[in-house]
Amino acid sequence: MAQTTPVDTAASGKSLPARLIGVLMSPRSTYPDVVARPHWFGALAFVVCVSAGAVFTFMSTEVGQQAGLDMQVRQMESFGRTMTDAQYRRMEQFAGMSKYFGALGQIVTLPVMALIVAGVAFAVFNAALGGDATFKQVYAVVAHSGVVVAVQQLFVLPLDYARETLSSPTNLTVFLPFLDENSFPARLLGSIDLFVIWWAINVSIGFAVLYRKRTGPIATTLLVIYVTIGLVIAAVKTALAGAS
């Protein structure tokens, strides 16, 4: 007897809004429908439009443009570099264009990142672990999980506007605000965001449904990779700042 797959057992097809809401509220019961009908374009278009629109709106304000300048200065300083007055004035001249660059960055980056994540997942689960999913199914899962990214933008940017800064209000430093922002622990916690953790768990549920595996090991692996990347970034920033 042929093995039962999520494609065989999925319920009647859900609309795109139902899928997007379901991925957030009840991913375990929604991803079977995504797997059975891997229509990725609508979900990806929604995520890109919401994210790009939110960034464009924020960066169209004086608060957003100033926050963008401040963030670039902090990023340079975190790597041990000091910005000259001439460099800062040059950046100010292009501040009005930041809304276009920011929106374009979302339009380009989000589909590419989804493609990379789907490609890696497809290689690991299909090539290394003998899975039988199609790349379209994997990409559909990743595209739908991106609704968490859209929610992040809608949640974070209004807070950034109120705080007049682009420093993330949802990274782990919010639990330890007394840390020196230039210390290694602060840099490490600052590189780990609660929304990314939510996304990692969400997409892990999608992969577990698609490949008929347990969610726990998949989510643990993704989170370990994420924290490891954060460790490397924090270590590099600390080393470069100490060498300056």
Image: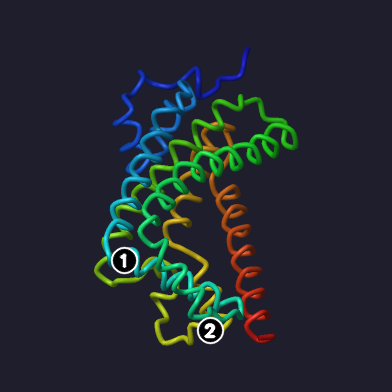
Tell me if 141 is positioned left or right of 45 in this view: right
- At 42% from the left edge and 38% from the top edge, which residue is drawn? 28
Q: Position of residue 118 (x, y in %)?
A: 59, 37
Q: Against 206, is 152 above or below?
A: below
| Quarter of the view holding residue 227 | bottom right
Q: Say which quadrant the N terminus sits in.
A: top right
Q: At which x and y percent is residue 122?
A: 65, 34
Q: Which residue is mark 1?
A: 160
Graded by Cα atoms within 10 Å as few (under 14), some (14 to 19) or many (20 or more), the crowding at tag 2 reads: some
Please name the residue that numbered disc 2 is placed on: 182
Instruction: Estimate the x, y position of residue 26 in percent, counting from the top left.
Output: 35, 40
Q: Amino acid at mark 2?
A: Asn
Type of amino acid under label 1: Asp
Find residue 42 and report its horizontal and vertical position in percent: 39, 28
Closest to the observer, 105 or 97: 97
Query: The C terminus is located in which quarter?
Result: bottom right
State the count of labels: 2
